[in-house]
Structure formats: C-alpha cells, structure tokens
Amino acid sequence: HVQLVESGGGSVQTGGSLRLSCAVSGNTDSGYCMAWFRQVSGKEREGVAVQYSGDSASYYASSVKGRFTISQDNANNILYLQMNSLTPEDTATYYCAAGQWIPRSYCTAGYAGSNEYNYWGQGTQVTVS
C-alpha cells in the first residue's frame, strides 16, 4: 500500500507555470505506475502524464505534451508535474495516482485507464485565468 499527498496547486494567470508535488509514502519498494490525472466537475477524469517508478520513460496526453513534464525524486519519494504555458483549459482538480499491478510497458505507453490505478491522492486545485 502507498499513500499519496498532492500539493502545489493554486491560481495562476494564462501563460504562467506551476509545479505540483505528490509525496509518496508506504510500501515504496515495489514498482508502481505513477500518473497525474485531472478532472473538471461534471467531466470524466483525464490522464495527463504517466511514468513508471524509477524509470524516465513517460507518456503525455496530447493536450499537455510539450508543456507539462512529469518527473520523480526517487530519494525523497516525490512525483512532480511541472506545468508551463498554462491556459484556462488546464483548470481542474489534479490527482496523483499509483497503480500497483500495471505492467511497466503498458504503463509508459499510456494504456492504463483511471480504473486500473488503485491508489489516489486527495487532489489539488489548479485555476488558470
């Protein structure tokens, strides 16, 4: 089991940047498919960026590719999402997720749906105006 706690959300103007953090605690010795999702009220949760723990290979949704970067601080068990060139369309609640049973190649190809992730953080709000 792992616990996920997001931070770093807030309000920013169009064109600005934010960095989200996800502190991972618990059984971090196992490999996990780590992802950032976002959700707007009334809409489905959208996968934004994916990376397997301890691996640099990444997958990005087309809506954020070239603007967002997912990364890990393995020493401190933190997952990051650097968000640049933000637009109002990026406004959402952002969630960190971990999938314990998602295979590495399947994970980094971006195939896993939200229902395949078994651990979730509480979410952090990002508002772009």
Image (cartoon, rainbow, N blue to C red):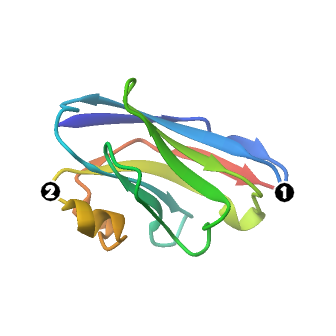
Q: Is residue 109 left or right of residue 71?
A: left
Of residue 1 and residue 51, the one placed in the foreground of this image is 51
Tell me what residue is drawn at x 23 percent, y 35 percent: 2
The correct choice, above or below, for 7 with respect to 107 in the image is: above
Tell me what residue is drawn at x 70 percent, y 67 percent: 89
Mark 1 in CB contact with mark 2 (< 8 angstroms):
no
Mark 2 residue type: Trp
Give the image location of residue 99, x and y in percent.
Answer: 24, 53
Calculate the distance from the C-alpha at mark 1 to the C-alpha at mark 2. 37 Å
Give the image location of residue 85, x and y in percent.
Answer: 77, 58
Of residue 53 and residue 27, the one placed in the foreground of this image is 53
Q: Which residue is mark 2?
A: 101
Q: Which residue is mark 1?
A: 14
Q: Is residue 96 left or right of residue 31?
A: right
Secondary element under disc 1, as helix, strand or loop, is loop
Secondary element under disc 2, as helix, strand or loop, is loop
Which quadrant is home to the N terminus?
A: top left
Tell me what residue is drawn at x 15 percent, y 56 percent: 101
Query: Sequence order check: which comes first, mark 1 or mark 2?
Result: 1
Quadrant housing residue 68: bottom right
Mark 1 residue type: Thr
Tell me what residue is drawn at x 18 percent, y 50 percent: 100
Give the image location of residue 124, x and y in percent.
Answer: 54, 43
Mark 1 Cα within 10 Å, few/some/many (few <14, many 20+)? some
The correct choice, above or below, for 11 with respect to 87 in the image is: above
The correct choice, above or below, for 32 with respect to 37 in the image is: above
Count up the numbered dots.
Answer: 2
Give the image location of residue 81, x and y in percent.
Answer: 55, 47
